[in-house]
Amino acid sequence: MTRSILLCLVALVISCTGTAQKKTQKEKKTYAVSKTNAEWKEILTPEQYYILRQAGTESPYSSPLNKTYAAGTFHCAACNTPLYESKHKFDSGTGWPSFDRAVKGNVDQDVDYKIGYARVELLCGTCGGHLGHAFNDGPRETTGWRHCINGDALIFESKKTDK
């Protein structure tokens, strides 16, 4: 009797770990701009490579783009895709450039568990470069979202004004 119970318990444990603990492997997206790590290192600064290709984070308040509010567009530093318009930028007080929305269709979202819990990771929709994260503590009068972006992931292009 004890042997039967033990066998049932072992079978139960094996069946639970065999199915419930399996992590599904998600298909990796193919991006329009794709390069090897060596190619990215040739065209990006070490800081840009760390942020965009290794999902790093720059120090808060280190980017001059944090206080850039001129009319224009913030582009991906790796592939020049327009990502954010300055009219959607706001001072979040966090030390990183913050926006309440992205240029439609140009920023992808993924889930990042690097610090022990799920966060919304933001990626360039053209090259897959890591930009930063999205949080739902943004301005309530607009979208309610805060796209917290690393300045080294961006290049600012000012809007040309007609004279």
Image (cartoon, grey):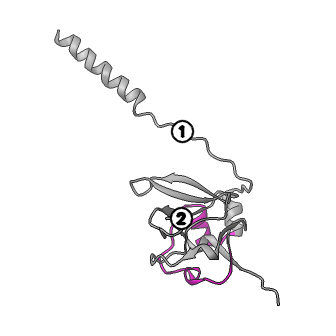
Of residue 131 and residue 86, the one placed in the foreground of this image is 86
Please report the residue visible at 63 percent of the width from the left and 60 percent of the height from the top: 129
Of residue 137 and residue 24, the one placed in the foreground of this image is 137
Quadrant for the N terminus, please.
Answer: top left
Mark 1 — residue? 25
Q: Note whether 83 is above or below 65 in the view shown.
A: above
Q: Is residue 155 left or right of residue 97?
A: right
Helix or strand or loop: what does disc 1 sit on? loop
Of the two numbered discs 2 and 1 in the rendering, the one whose residue sits closer to the viewer: 2
* Disc nearer the start of the sequence (2/1): 1
Q: Is residue 128 magenta?
A: no
- Tell me which amino acid carries mark 1: Gln
Quarter-of-image position of residue 21 = top left
Q: Residue furthest front?
A: 141
Q: Is residue 62 left or right of residue 4?
A: right
- The stretch in magenta equals 44-73
Q: Residue furthest left?
A: 2
Q: Is residue 4 left or right of residue 144?
A: left
How far is disc 2 from disc 1 in space, using C-alphas? Answer: 32 Å
Label 2: few (<14), some (14–19) or many (≥20) C-alpha neighbours in 10 Å: some
Residues under numbered marks 2 and 1 in contact, where contact means CB atoms less than 8 Å apart? no
